Amino acid sequence: MGIEDVRQNEDEINLIDYAIVLLKRKKLIVGIPLVCVAITLIISLVIPNIYRAETRILAPQEGNAGTAAQLLSQVGSGLSGFSGKLGVNNQSDLYVGMLQSRTVLDTIITRFDLKKRYEDKTFEDARKSLKEHIAAQIDPKSNIIVLAVEDKDPQQAADMANAFVEELRKLTKGLSITEAAQRRLFFEEQLKDTKESLIKVEESMKSFQERTGALHVDEQVKAVIKNVAQLRAEIAAKEVELRVVKTYATPHNPDLQRAEETLAGMKSELAKIESKSGASYDPLMPTGRMPSVGTDYIRRLRDLKFNETLYELLTKQYEAAKIDEARGAAVIQVIDRAIPPEKRERPKRTVMLVVAGAVSFLLSIVTVLLLDYRERISADPDNRQRIEQLKKYAELDDLRMLLTKKGVLRQLERFRS
């Protein structure tokens, strides 16, 4: 017989021994699981049933600033980036946080008298208890908010879930009106200041035009240039006419004198136009004053256009804020209202019984093996003597005597006194 055959026979003997041990205490192996399953069944029947009611809502995809953003986009493409920042990036996360806010929780606690139901003395304890009975999650695929409420009463669970949605609507409406009112007041103040600035710029432009005669510089420049060219041509023609008259008339000839006076007047007018000075108001301003007058005119015109554009922009924002304030809160769409559940959420009695039976069965086998091991050790004389020594050293009197000898108890008594 080889070594492998011997090992195989020993393994078979060990397995048979284990089977004998288990069958020897089969009542204990069967009894322990039965008792545990019975106790678990009683506990599961004593535990109150918990029901779970769910409601599904769809949060608005745009915030209250949507109207303002649409109106602002009409001003120009340069403001498109600003208008895109007026909304909230993730509305669903925002509304989940609002559902679990202290304002909503306290309203639900007061409405359903949850302090008494949860046997809590303070609102803080009641809020903690309520948070343990609610769960708000976001479906990552559909972006739908799922609000679940658990309670012993199925009707109570459904009513509380629907009440959360109602309180969320009230909260969003209040926040929306407050935000819109604040934005309206802000734009109203800015619009008032811009209007006053615009009036000042308009008055400055009016005074400048009255002082310089610069009504429309571009058109006036064209008119001045045309007038200068025409006047120079008339002067040249008049000089030719005078040379012709001088060939046959004397210096005292009335026609010659009138022609000379006319020519002198025309040259004086040309000199006036081409000089840097002139009357306080002259539609045909001198050409020498055109650069300075044009520069001042452009500056005042730039300030006027800036204030007009700013006033127009703030007017649009102000009207958008008024519309948002009148419109109220964003609409929260309820996809599924909570209804009283027909089946309990927990306790799951079948699962409890299966787990209790499996665990207790394994524990019973371990217990039987330990008992058999103890019997085998007790049957050996050498082991019996060792066990007696362990019992002797484990007695309390011996331990007390040992501690007394070493003075440990005396130190403890002094410390107590």
Image (cartoon, rainbow, N blue to C red):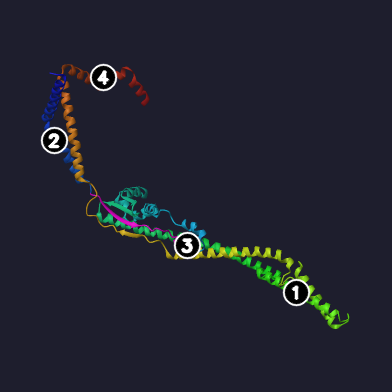
Kindly state the secondary structure of the residue where label 4 is placed: helix
Which residue matches tag 1?
A: 233
Kindly state the secondary structure of the residue where label 1 is placed: helix
* Discs 2/4, front: 2
Residue type (three-letter) at the residue carrying disc 2: Gly
Decide: is 35 above or below 178.
Answer: above
Q: CA distance from mark 4 to mark 1?
A: 143 Å
Q: CA distance from mark 2 to mark 3?
A: 75 Å
Which quadrant of the rendered structure holds the N terminus?
top left
Query: Disc 4 or 1, which lies upstream in sequence?
Result: 1
Residue range of the region highlighted in magenta in the rendering:
49-66
Q: Quadrant of residue 190?
A: bottom right
Q: Can you see residue 283? A: no
Residue 110 among magenta residues: no
Q: CA distance from mark 3 to mark 4?
A: 89 Å
Q: Are marks 2 and 1 in contact (CB under 8 Å)?
A: no
Q: CA distance from mark 3 to mark 1?
A: 61 Å
Q: Are marks 2 and 3 in contact (CB under 8 Å)?
A: no
Image spot of residue 289 (x, y percent): 73, 66
Q: Which mark is residue 386?
A: none
Image spot of residue 279 (x, y percent): 75, 71
Which residue matches tag 4?
A: 398
